[in-house]
Image (cartoon, grey):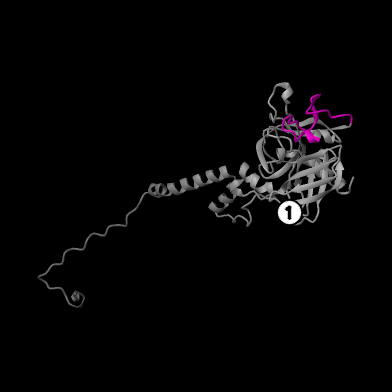
């Protein structure tokens, strides 16, 4: 209905009702706004706390505070392939590093022994213990995916119980990341990967229980002793000395002593030459010796939480000499 009141004068006998009072716009106290924003602040605080637990606080804080976004590729730990979601877990370390750990079978005139090794280049350079391949006439290497290669000895250092071997015709292999053993602390969590008793890719975990242990091993192991590692009745480990005592056989007259990382991660015959790994997926040591009481002592054979690894800094310092065939 059209309103015509704007075009005519009001009738004198008609009184329009007074207009409604003009109320000012509502004013809300500041506390109401603060109450409304509290849930958002709480969510942010919870998100930051969760990120701190997961190790990704810095990137999340940048997003929440409007800073620059996290750079591309930060979904994995720098220098490793351990995903951010799996960082700090045994499963994450095992998934990332297992493809770089191999099983080594060394054939001598008196039998065959099994050890482990660590791939350090995509072309098939592998670090292991000297006592794993000492005296071998043939060396076979089995990768985690089942492929098998023949290997040649590149160089050995019996004084450090280290050896470098190379695979024939290998390429595109996943190389392990070598860490910094100088930063290792007692109590750090570690993972050991190797082939104990020929069980390829076995993963165990524990902590670093001591540093700078003086461990003495034979420079050139008696092939007969190495064959005993495959004897399930004796279940002997490789011979070494520690604390003035001899374990797992006689080290003989030709022996060497080095400073070792001690770990309670379970090691057994066949772990020799395998990797001791930190929770970022970096190699911090090459497993080299263990204490395993024999049945003759009345103790149960097997690992009792005393394993030893050559620090990776020792390995890195020796690589040039090993590659030159020294």
Mark yes or no: residue 88 visible.
no
Looking at the image, residue 261 lies above or below residue 164: above
- The residue that disc 1 covers is 173
Q: Quadrant of residue 162?
A: top right
Relative side of 123 to 146, left or right: right
Residue beneath the point at 62% across and 41% down: 90
Query: How far across and how far down the image is residue 208, in percent?
Result: 69, 34
Report the front residue among 16 and 211.
211
Residue beneath the point at 89% across and 49% down: 324
Relative side of 73 to 40, left or right: right
Report the magenta stretch's main SS.
loop
Q: Quadrant of residue 181?
A: top right
Report the front residue among 208 and 36.
208
Q: Mark 1 packing: few (<14 Cα in 10 Å), some, or many (20+)?
A: some
Looking at the image, residue 140 lies above or below residue 303: below
Residue beneath the point at 70% across and 28% down: 301
Looking at the image, residue 109 lies above or below residue 21: above
125 within the magenta span: no
Query: How far across and how far down the image is residue 15, in percent?
Result: 13, 67
Query: How far across and how far down the image is residue 177, in percent?
Result: 73, 48
Q: Quadrant of residue 109?
A: top right
The quadrant in which the C terminus is found is top right
**Which span of residues is magenta-colored?**
226-253
Looking at the image, the residue that sits furthest to the left is 13
The quadrant in which the N terminus is found is bottom left
Looking at the image, the residue that sits furthest to the bottom is 7
Label total for image: 1
Q: Secondary structure at mark 1?
A: loop
Report the front residue among 206 and 171.
171
């Amino acid at each position: 209905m059209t309103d015509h009141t704007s075009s005519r004068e009001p009738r004198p006998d008609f009184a329009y009702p007074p207009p409604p009072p003009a109320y000012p716009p509502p004013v809300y106290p500041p506390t109401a706004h603060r109450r409304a924003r509290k849930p958002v602040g709480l969510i942010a605080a919870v998100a930051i706390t969760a990120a701190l637990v997961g190790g990704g606080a810095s990137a999340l804080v940048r997003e929440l505070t409007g800073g620059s976004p996290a750079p591309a590729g930060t979904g994995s730990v720098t220098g490793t392939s351990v995903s951010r979601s799996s960082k700090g877990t045994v499963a994450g370390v095992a998934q990332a590093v297992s493809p770089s750990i191999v099983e080594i079978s060394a054939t001598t005139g008196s039998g065959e022994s099994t050890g482990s090794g660590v791939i350090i280049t995509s072309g098939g350079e592998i670090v292991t213990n000297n006592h794993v391949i000492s005296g071998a006439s043939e060396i076979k290497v089995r990768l985690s995916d089942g492929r098998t290669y023949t290997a040649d000895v590149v160089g050995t250092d019996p004084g450090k119980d280290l050896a470098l071997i190379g695979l024939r015709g290998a390429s595109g292999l996943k190389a392990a990341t070598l860490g910094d053993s100088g930063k290792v602390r007692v109590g750090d969590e570690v993972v050991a990967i190797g082939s104990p008793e020929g069980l390829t890719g076995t993963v165990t975990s524990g902590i670093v229980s001591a540093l700078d242990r003086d461990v003495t091993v034979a420079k050139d192991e008696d092939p007969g002793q190495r064959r005993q590692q495959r004897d399930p009745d004796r279940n002997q480990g490789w011979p070494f000395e520690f604390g003035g005592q001899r374990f797992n056989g006689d080290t003989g007259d030709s022996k060497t002593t080095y400073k070792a990382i001690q770990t309670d991660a379970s090691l057994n015959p066949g772990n020799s030459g395998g990797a001791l790994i930190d929770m970022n997926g970096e190699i911090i040591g090459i497993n080299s010796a263990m204490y395993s009481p024999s049945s003759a002592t009345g103790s149960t054979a097997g690992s009792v939480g005393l394993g030893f690894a050559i620090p990776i800094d020792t390995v890195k310092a020796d690589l040039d000499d090993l590659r030159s065939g020294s």
